[in-house]
Amino acid sequence: MKTGKLGDLKIVRYGHPALREQASPVGRVTREVKALAARMIELMIEARGLGLAANQVGVPRRLAVVVIEDTPTVFIDPELEKAEGSEKAEEGCLSLPRLYGEVVRPRKVKVTARNLAGKRFTLEGEGLLARALCHELDHLEGRLFVDQVDESTLHWLLRTSDGEEPVVQPTALEDALKVFLLAREGEKHR
């Protein structure tokens, strides 16, 4: 697995090609895989996220980290085994910062994966945990929450400089995605 300098990894934004790639299996758990997982945990915590997939740091491999009961958990080559029910709730994404909207997800899921020791485990989750797991598994398939968002609920959550409550600004999907693409173009020309 070629990851370059792990310290240089950062969360990529909408428009980066890795976000639309189907991730390939990790296979053997090497020192490099463990280092990648550790760096992903650092980035997720810095960004105050609940989960992060390797695609989101530009590495399209089947590796994700999710916070479970305040503890980051690593999922290597995760697979969704079972999904039950459905519920609609607001989601955002570290690769589409400040953009939120409602998405229908399974209410309960069962996921199998391997941990950093290479041992297989199964996890069942409900509610927010089920949502986070599905969100990260979607990333590994090259899907984003905006692919299934209820567009009528899409909005920016804008911070104010004076510490007041954030401002909610409704937006159209096409307009929101243009913002990220224009920002990406600007970064390329720096």
Image: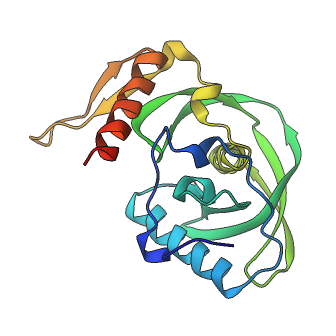
Compare residues 185 and 172 and report the one nearer the observer.
Answer: 185
Left or right, residue 164 beside residue 108:
left
- Number of on-image labels: 0
Residue at 67% from the left image edge and 77% from the top image edge: 33
Left or right, residue 92 beside residue 171:
right
Residue sticking out furthest to the right: 81
Give the percent coordinates (x, y) of residue 154.
Answer: 47, 21
Indicate how the structure is coloured in the image: rainbow
Q: Is residue 1 above or below residue 149?
A: below
Residue sticking out furthest to the left: 162
Q: Looking at the rendering, in which quadrant would you find the N terminus?
A: bottom right
Compare residues 28 and 79 and report the one nearer the observer.
Answer: 28
Give the percent coordinates (x, y) of residue 129.
Answer: 66, 51
Residue sticking out furthest to the front: 189
Give the percent coordinates (x, y) of residue 73.
Answer: 65, 69
Give the percent coordinates (x, y) of residue 167.
Answer: 25, 27
Compare residues 46 and 1 and report the one nearer the observer.
Answer: 1
Left or right, residue 187 beside residue 95:
left
Q: Is residue 148 above or below residue 151?
A: below
Which quarter of the picture shows residue 85? top right
Residue at 85% from the left image edge and 37% from the top image edge: 84
Q: Is residue 159 above or below residue 78?
A: above
Residue at 55% from the left image edge and 77% from the top image edge: 38
Residue at 48% from the left image edge and 76% from the top image edge: 5
